[in-house]
Image: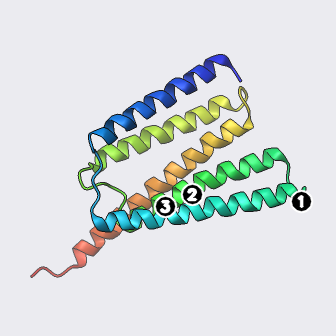
Amino acid sequence: MDVAFTLGLGAGLLIAAAVLAIMSAKNAWKYDERQRIARGEASAWALKLIVAANIAGILAQLLDLISTMTLLYLLTGAMIAAAALFAGICIYRDAWLAINERPRDVAFALAVAFLSNLALGFLEIGCIGALVSFFNFSVAAMLLSIAVNWYIKRRLDRRADDEEPSA
């Protein structure tokens, strides 16, 4: 792995950790009880998916059905799928956004993260290796699925609001 890439990755992770620490310290995200329950259930389903993928991957590896590289792809894909599952459950149970969170900010962050991962995936195809490109393309696909699900949920909510009889 290239030294510049490693340093860039480390710097990016440190910046992300610092931003999350600052936001958590300010108690930026506030969820009501119903949202907390829904997010807990979504976390449980995501964890079940990761555990199932790990068990399947380890058994397949022990039985010599897949290579170590295939196992890495499987586990990487499972983690990304678990994050998408968590987000999807939260979106449809109205637990995606915090009470004090602005949808426009979240949409902007999703768009930036999607475009960044898509661009990095194309840039890394020949440079670093297939696993990193697979990771970036998979994260981009996950972010796109989150955005599409969020859009569908918002449309369904608007349609339900329009169909409610006004008293």
Q: Quadrant of residue 33?
A: bottom left
32 with respect to 48 (left or right) = left
Question: For the residue carrying disc 2, how many other residues have a C-alpha within 10 Å: few (<14), some (14-19), or many (20+)?
Answer: many
Of callouts 1 and 2, which one flags the residue occurring earlier in the amino acid sequence? 1
126 with respect to 8 (left or right) = right
Callout 2 secondary element: helix
The foreground one among 88 and 126 is: 88
| Residue identifier under label 2 | 82
Report x, y in % for residue 96: 37, 58
| Residue identifier under label 3 | 43
Report x, y in % for residue 19: 38, 33
Estimate the spatial distance between the alpha carbons at disc 3 and disc 1, rounded to whole Å.
Answer: 30 Å
Give residue 110's mark: none
Q: Is residue 114 above or below residue 144?
A: above
User: Is there any visible trace of residue 37 in the rendered image?
Assistant: yes
162 with respect to 71 (left or right) = left
Callout 1 secondary element: loop
Identify the residue at image location x=64%, y=55%.
78
Q: Is residue 23 above or below residue 34?
A: above
User: Is there any visible trace of residue 152 in the rendered image?
Assistant: no
Between disc 1 and disc 2, the foreground one is 1
Identify the residue at image location x=89%, y=59%.
63
Instruction: Give the residue type at disc 3.
Output: Ser
Pick the quarter of the image with the C terminus.
Answer: bottom left
Q: How is the image coloured?
A: rainbow
Give residue 63's mark: 1
